[in-house]
């Protein structure tokens, strides 16, 4: 069965620090990849997505992610975090053959002002 | 434009009871998916409805059933509730199939179900 692993359950950073959140998936074929974010008290919302093409994708609020097929990874990055980035971040994968999204367990990011 | 709405916000039930959760999709969306999110975990796919039929189902028992109405709104029903059914239940809607390879899902605020 497919699975998605997010390596860090909790991350604490200071403002202006660089961020990288890891995401690995188990499926070897064509994949559609997503990062969703949930800010405190708000709904899950899409941060960025990868379907095909340039493996470096840019999302909202200065976030980007790189798809590395050989490593089955889709890590999320931001060069300089802000206090407002405090949220929970979820990686999700669809294998292209069905309608199911498989989710990681999430990473809670806390930014210290 | 209203986004995805869910009702009720919170619900407390006892073991063995039945519950119905409701979801109205974002305007223009015809596909509704339901997820269960236990504390400290990511969402788990329950099923997806399209054209009033269950299009795909995740690894959930038959106690979990659903329905989609002609106006695309949807219900999730859970029978014979267990303590382990306590979770946040999320509804997500998406654009009509075929618009893109995989359509972005828009999420509602969820219904927090507590089973005592």
Image (cartoon, coloured by chain):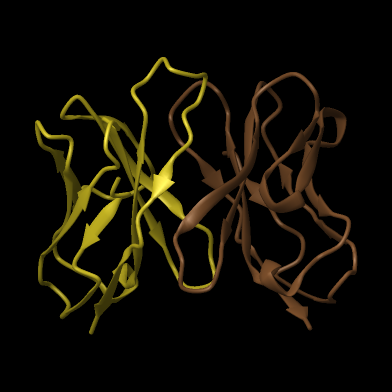
Chain colours: A brown, B yellow
Task: Specify whether A15 is left or right of B3.
Answer: right
Q: Residue furthest top?
A: B98
Location of residue A81 (image quadrant): bottom right
Check the image and report above or below for B39 versus B3: below
Residue A84, percent from left and from top: 67, 70
Residue A2, percent from left and from top: 59, 39
Q: Is residue A74 visible?
A: no
In depth, the one of A63 and A51 nearer the eye is A63
From the image, which quarter does the N terminus of chain B lie in? top left
From the image, which quarter does the C terminus of chain B lie in? bottom left
Q: Residue at x 88, y 56 (%)?
A: A79
Check the image and report above or below for A85 versus A74: below
Residue A46, percent from left and from top: 56, 46
Task: Specify whether A106 is left or right of B70.
Answer: right
In depth, the one of A36 and B16 nearer the eye is A36
Location of residue A50 (image quadrant): top right
Q: Residue furthest front?
A: B1
In depth, the one of A39 and A12 nearer the eye is A39
Task: Specify whether B103 is left or right of A104.
Answer: left
Q: Residue at x 58, y 28 (%)?
A: A95
């Amino acid at each position: 069965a497919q699975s998605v692993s997010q390596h860090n359950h909790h991350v604490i950073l200071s403002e202006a620090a660089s961020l990288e959140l890891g995401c690995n998936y188990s499926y070897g074929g064509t994949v559609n990849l997503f990062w969703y974010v949930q800010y405190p008290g708000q709904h899950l919302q899409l941060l960025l997505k990868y379907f095909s093409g340039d493996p470096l994708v840019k999302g909202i609020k200065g976030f980007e992610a790189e798809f590395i097929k050989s490593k089955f990874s889709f890590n999320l990055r931001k060069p300089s975090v802000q206090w407002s980035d405090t949220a929970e971040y979820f990686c999700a994968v669809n294998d292209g053959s069905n309608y199911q999204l498989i989710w990681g367990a999430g990473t809670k990011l806390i930014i210290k002002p | 434009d209203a986004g995805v709405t869910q009702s009720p916000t919170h619900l407390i039930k006892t073991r063995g009871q039945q519950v119905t959760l409701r979801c109205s999709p974002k305007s223009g969306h015809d596909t509704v998916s339901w997820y269960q999110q236990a504390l400290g975990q990511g969402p788990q796919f329950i099923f997806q409805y399209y054209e009033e039929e269950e299009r795909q189902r995740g690894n959930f028992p038959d106690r979990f059933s659903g329905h989609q109405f002609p106006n695309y709104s949807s219900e999730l029903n859970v029978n014979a509730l267990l303590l382990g059914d306590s979770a946040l239940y999320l509804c997500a809607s998406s654009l009509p199939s075929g618009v893109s390879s995989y359509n972005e899902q828009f999420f509602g605020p969820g219904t927090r179900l507590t089973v005592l």
